[in-house]
Image (cartoon, grey):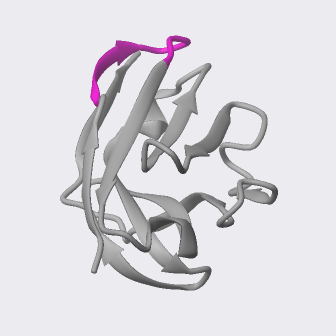
Amino acid sequence: QVQLVESGGGLVQAGGSLRLSCSASGRTFTAYALGWFRQAPGKEREFVASINWSGGSTYYADSVKGRFTISRDNAKKVVYLQMNSLKPEDTAVYYCAAGEVGNYKYWGQGTQVTVSS
């Protein structure tokens, strides 16, 4: 069992940066891939980025590639999403998830990111 809690969301101007954190509880944290997803109002939840158990492999949606960076600290049981050059279209609720790539079993409650133009 893994419980996930996101933090770090907020309001930022276009071009600015935010770093999201997702803290996990549970002894099997290192066994899981971790992902970030987002859901904008009126839209379906979409994939943002993922990282494998060791941190050696990362994947990004085309829309955030080159601007966002996912990383994890297994000792602290935290996964991060560094978001740079933010755009208004990045506005969404951001969720972290743990499990297998493509089959995430555990989800956090989400944190709101709002980018003003």
Picture quarter containing residue 109? Answer: bottom left
Compare residues 114 and 34 and report the one nearer the observer.
34
Magenta residues (range): 9-17
Residue 108 appears in the picture as rendered: yes
Residue 32 appears in the picture as rendered: no
Q: Position of residue 21 (x, y in %)?
A: 38, 37
Q: Is residue 73 left or right of residue 37?
A: right
Which quadrant of the figure contains the N terminus? bottom left
- Asked if the magenta segment contains residue 11, the reply would be yes
Compare residues 54 and 111 and report the one nearer the observer.
54
Decide: is 14 above or below 8: above
Residue furthest to the bottom in view is: 103
Could you tell me which residue is drawn at 47 percent across and 38 percent down? 89
Number of numbered discs visible in the structure rendering: 0
Q: Is residue 97 left or right of residue 16?
A: left
Which quadrant of the figure contains the C terminus? top left
Q: Position of residue 55 (x, y in %)?
A: 71, 54
- Asked if the magenta segment contains residue 10, the reply would be yes
Q: Position of residue 79 (x, y in %)?
A: 48, 46
Q: Is residue 111 left or right of residue 86?
A: left
Decide: is 12 above or below 20: above
Could you tell me which residue is drawn at 24 percent across and 43 percent down? 111
Q: Position of residue 75 (x, y in %)?
A: 51, 45
Could you tell me which residue is drawn at 61 percent across and 19 percent down? 85
Compare residues 34 and 117 and report the one nearer the observer.
34
Decide: is 25 above or below 93: below
Could you tell me which residue is drawn at 69 percent across and 31 percent down? 67
Decide: is 25 above or below 104: above
Picture quarter containing residue 43? Answer: bottom left
